Amino acid sequence: MLHTPLASHSNTHIAPGNKAVVCALSASYVSTFAGYPLDSIKSRLQTTKTRITVPKLAMMVYREEGVMGFYRGLWIPLMTISFVRAASFTIYSGTKEHFAKHNILCRNSMVDAALTGGISGAMSGALISFGSAPFELVKVRRQLEYTIAATKGVSMVKPPGTVEAVKDIYRNNGLKGLYTGFRLHFVRDTAGTALYFLEYDGMRHLLGRQRSGEQGLTPSWLPIHPQLVPFVCGSLSGVTSWALIYPLDVVKTKVQQRSLAGERYRSPWETLYRLVLTLLNQNQYWLASEEYIVG
């Protein structure tokens, strides 16, 4: 329960930890709503069979599905994000506390700080994936409704809702259908979260954070304000870790899309091979086109 600033500070102030949680959850909801259209376009780009630019695809979605086409399936991450973030942070923090309590990887070095963060992140990502996999599958299904319908040769006037999508998956494949592509989802979340916190905690240590968690002075080669350190480290860690695991995310989405469309199963390795082959063929086509135009 939040209290007004006029209340007694000794009895009603919000603990710093609770403030961080409230701010983190608020930021998560805002960022999810703002970034979801990009996530929807990402899923479509990952499963398209022809080369297309992001602006052109966005215009195509707008013409065929309207603004709501960018937000189909939004309720799924909005409903689950608070639980996922809270559980993920709890597991991550608990693992780090366990290491500190048993004097594991407790040297005041960047290597120990990074390894502690990486292992704690891997534990968090692995455990959370068991609960998040079905929700992400349904989200992918909602985002790719028109693509899946086109693959099946079905003309869609109005896409089904989230509940109908879940029923359809369960009707076709039972409970295990909700875990389609789970192994890829598990590896992606485990590796992605491990990489993120490996980099984040390593960089935080490099930029002056003590092993106790307190932020010290930043080094002379990067004299930024201490309050900017979490933003800088989080931004760099997020971009680089996602870039490293993105190919795995593409394969996961493609495997799930084929299964939802009732197409023949392809192993992750076969899917990756075909995606690379398609990319090489497209590049050869564009190079040949440019050479022809140039003359």
Image (cartoon, rainbow, N blue to C red):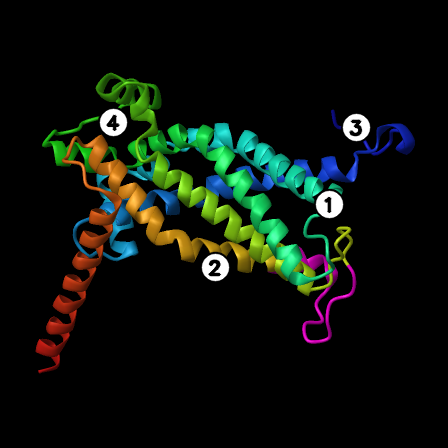
Disc 2 secondary structure class:
helix
Mark carried by residue 100: 1
Specify whether residue 217 is painted magenta. yes
Disc 4 secondary structure class:
loop
| Amino acid type shown at disc 3 | His
Q: Are marks 3 and 1 in contact (CB under 8 Å)?
A: no
Going from the N terminus, do you reach mark 1 or mark 2 first?
1
| Amino acid type shown at disc 1 | Ala
Which of the two marks, 2 or 3, is nearer to us in this view?
A: 2
Q: Are marks 1 and 4 in contact (CB under 8 Å)?
A: no
Graded by Cα atoms within 10 Å as few (under 14), some (14 to 19) or many (20 or more), the crowding at tag 4 reads some
| Amino acid type shown at disc 2 | Thr
Is 25 located above or below residue 277 in the figure?
A: above
Q: Position of residue 291 (x, y in %)?
A: 12, 78
What residue is shown with label 4? 159
Which of the two marks, 1 or 2, is nearer to us in this view?
A: 1
Residue drawn where x is 61% and y is 50% of the image: 117
What residue is shown with label 3? 3
Q: Position of residue 224 (x, y in %)?
A: 70, 67
Query: Could you tell me how far apart the alpha carbons at marks 3 and 1 are, in whole angstroms?
Result: 34 Å
Query: Could you tell me how far apart the alpha carbons at marks 2 and 3 are, in whole angstroms?
Result: 39 Å
| Amino acid type shown at disc 4 | Pro
What residue is shown with label 2? 240
